[in-house]
Amino acid sequence: MRFIYIILIIFLCGMIGTATGEIINLFIPQTSNFYQFFTLKINPEWKISNFDIIILNLSLSLKFNINPFTLIGFIVGSIFSFKKV
């Protein structure tokens, strides 16, 4: 149960960090020095383009959007969840 709690807290803090980073990107002017740092994104993707058997055709993909605030959220979530456990 503790493991699920830790993973859930880290995941939620990462989601909050991603949302915060995207909102901040809306307000930073493109001429700012910080704009390039805040718009850095890593987009890992896992994709099964087409899994076809006779009775089923399945296409599946999973894509993550990771920005600097996501990493900050992961760190804050890790610290918070390990202090609670």
Image (cartoon, rainbow, N blue to C red):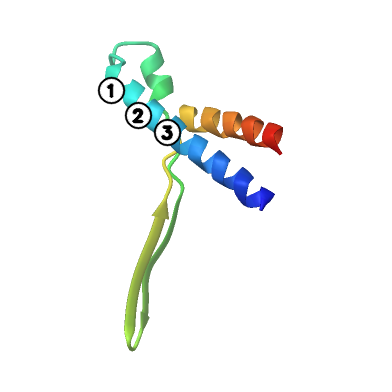
Tell whether label 1 touches label 2 (CB within 8 Å): yes
Secondary structure beneath label 2: helix
The CA span between labels 2 and 1 is 7 Å
| Residue density around tag 1, few if under 14, some if 14–19, many if 20 or more, within 10 Å | few
User: Looking at the image, which is closer to me, 35 or 19?
Assistant: 19
Left or right: 25 as drawn, with respect to 7: left
Secondary structure beneath label 1: helix
Amino acid type at image mark 2:
Glu
User: Looking at the image, which is closer to me, 75 or 67?
Assistant: 75
Q: Which residue is situated farthest in the top direction here?
A: 32
Among the two numbered marks 3 and 1 on one chain, the one whose residue lies closer to the N terminus: 3
Amino acid type at image mark 1:
Leu
In which quadrant of the rendered view does residue 9 lie? top right
The CA span between labels 3 and 1 is 13 Å
Q: Write down the residue under mark 3.
A: 18
Left or right: 37 as drawn, with respect to 80: left
Tell whether label 3 touches label 2 (CB within 8 Å): yes
Q: Residue at coordinates 56% horizontally, 34% vertically from top-left?
A: 74
Secondary structure beneath label 3: helix
Q: Write down the residue under mark 2.
A: 22
Residue 10, percent across and down?
Answer: 57, 39
Q: Residue at coordinates 33% horizontally, 82% vertically from top-left?
A: 56
Residue 83, percent across and down?
Answer: 70, 31
| Residue density around tag 2, few if under 14, some if 14–19, many if 20 or more, within 10 Å | some
Residue 40, percent across and down?
Answer: 42, 29
Q: Write down the residue under mark 1.
A: 26
In which quadrant of the rendered view does residue 80 lie? top right
Amino acid type at image mark 3:
Thr
Residue 35, percent across and down?
Answer: 36, 18
The CA span between labels 2 and 3 is 6 Å
User: Looking at the image, which is closer to me, 70 or 79?
Assistant: 79
